[in-house]
Amino acid sequence: PAVTQVNDGLGSDSAYASSTTELSGNWTSAAYPSGGIQKYWYAIGSSPGAVDIVNWTDNGLTLFVTASGLSLVSGQTYYFSIKVENVAGLLSSVSDSDGQIIDNVSPVVVVNAGSIPSDWTNSSPAVLVDCTDGLSGCDTVSQRYKSYAASPPANCPEDYTNYSLAQGAAITSHLWVC
């Protein structure tokens, strides 16, 4: 029997990875009733079942791997392929992941604060926040902004407030955003 689930990444299945030099995958253990499992083999390719990035590699009995020293291209999808070898040396059929896209380009965040008064007194200017990312999209649930209830300091401190914003959302009840 083959491995039934191959995930991209080290946890639950990931659709995206950010590194162009390493890639991770994990899989469920296979049930091999006749003789037991001797080892798992993995390969990485630019299509399911392909071995053009990493040829078949012995991974022992470990159910995950991070392959490094790779030359991956942003925007390209890569797939893990797994096969099982039993103690008699027989190989299972190949199971493939659904692929992960390399996205090493940061999203573009645009903050348009509009007209900010010079004295910052009793002011709540509208701040429009927008984000674009051509590959993996923007995580609008965890964008972090700093708001001030009085005049802002000269430098932005590292204590931020999380706002759950839809793309193109406006913050209208705070003085400033760092």
Image (spheres, rainbow, N blue to C red):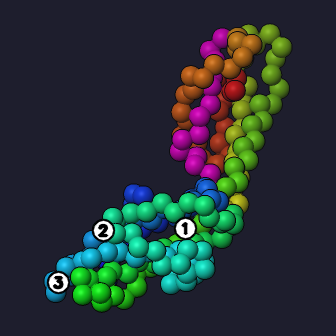
Q: Residue at x 80, y 31 (%)?
A: 114
Of the pair 140 and 61, the residue shown nearer to us: 61
Residue 31 place in picture, x, y as percent: 21, 78
Identify the magenta region.
Answer: 136-150
> Mark 2 belongs to which amino acid?
Leu
- Identify the residue under disc 1: 100
Q: Residues within 10 Å of mark 1 (few under 14, many from 20)?
A: many
Disc with the residue nearer the chain's start (2 vs 1): 2
> Mark 1 belongs to which amino acid?
Gln
Find numbered disc 1 in the image and state the secondary structure of the residue it sits on. strand
Find numbered disc 2 in the image and state the secondary structure of the residue it sits on. loop
Find numbered disc 3 in the image and state the secondary structure of the residue it sits on. loop
Q: Gap in Å between the C-alphas at discs 1 and 3?
A: 34 Å
Q: Residue at x 54, y 41 (%)?
A: 142
Q: Residue at x 60, y 23 (%)?
A: 158
127 sits left or right of 69 in the view: right
Residue 172 place in picture, x, y as percent: 66, 29
Frontmost of labels 1 and 3 is 3
Question: Do labels 1 and 3 touch, CB within 8 Å?
Answer: no
176 sits left or right of 12 in the view: right
Residue 39: which quarter of the image? bottom left
- Identify the residue under disc 2: 61
Most common secondary structure along the magenta stretch: loop
> Mark 3 belongs to which amino acid?
Gly
Disc with the residue nearer the chain's start (3 vs 2): 3
Q: Gap in Å between the C-alphas at discs 2 and 1?
A: 23 Å
Of the pair 52 and 27, the residue shown nearer to us: 52
Query: Is 6 placed above or below 135 here?
Result: below
- Identify the residue under disc 3: 35
Residue at the front extreme of this rendering: 88
Disc with the residue nearer the chain's start (1 vs 3): 3
